[in-house]
Amino acid sequence: MKTASTIAFLICAIVCETASACGDMGTPADFPLNDEVSFADFVERLRRGVASDDKNAVADSLDYPVTIAVKGKQRKIDRPEFVRRYSQIMTPKIRMAISEARFVTRHDFSCLWWNWRGVMFGNGDVWVSGDNPTRSITFNN
């Protein structure tokens, strides 16, 4: 019986670890955005839109153009194209990275990391940079 429960525990540990978009991401550098309150609001609006799979709410939380990167090729798109291609852009991996992200302050956050280039969701699935939290956002598929 101990063997079966040990195997079940190991399987759960492996599944739980791989199901998360983030792990130990290390200690980030100085916070690169000017306004923590606006960024916290942005993260929450984005999370709510993704959680309800509301492409208009997600689209409304962004400034345009946004950048999408598919197979290493980047291109900028406007709001109508974002809404039209929502299901292609917001892959399960990107939705998970956004849904697991939490930001209250630079000292109270999870599943985010940052450096001088911006704030990273997940394992680089989404990057945000610029003075305004939504000024420049890249979705990496």
Image: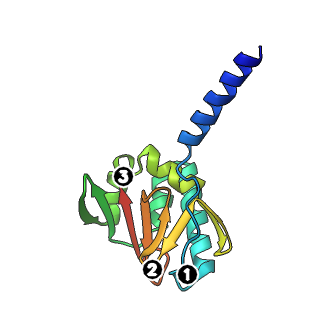
* Discs 2, 1 touching: Cβ within 8 Å: yes
Report, in whole angstroms, how far the alpha carbon at label 2 lies from the one at label 1.
Answer: 8 Å
Q: Residue furthest front?
A: 3
Report, in whole angstroms, how far the alpha carbon at label 3 lies from the one at label 2.
Answer: 25 Å
Q: What amino acid is found at the position of numbered circle 2 in the picture?
A: Trp
Q: Return the residue at label 3.
A: 89
- Look at the numbered disc 2 and give the secondary structure of its residue: loop
Q: Nearer the viewer, residue 9 or 78?
A: 9
Asked where in the image residue 136 lies, by quadrant, the reply is: bottom left
Q: Nearer the viewer, residue 109 or 80?
A: 109
Give the left or right position of residue 132, taking residue 74 as reference: right
Q: Return the residue at label 1.
A: 30
Q: What amino acid is found at the position of numbered circle 1 in the picture?
A: Asp
Of circles 3 and 2, the one toward us is: 2
Q: Residue at x 77, y 18 (%)?
A: 2
Q: Return the residue at label 2.
A: 116
Q: What amino acid is found at the position of numbered circle 3 in the picture?
A: Ile
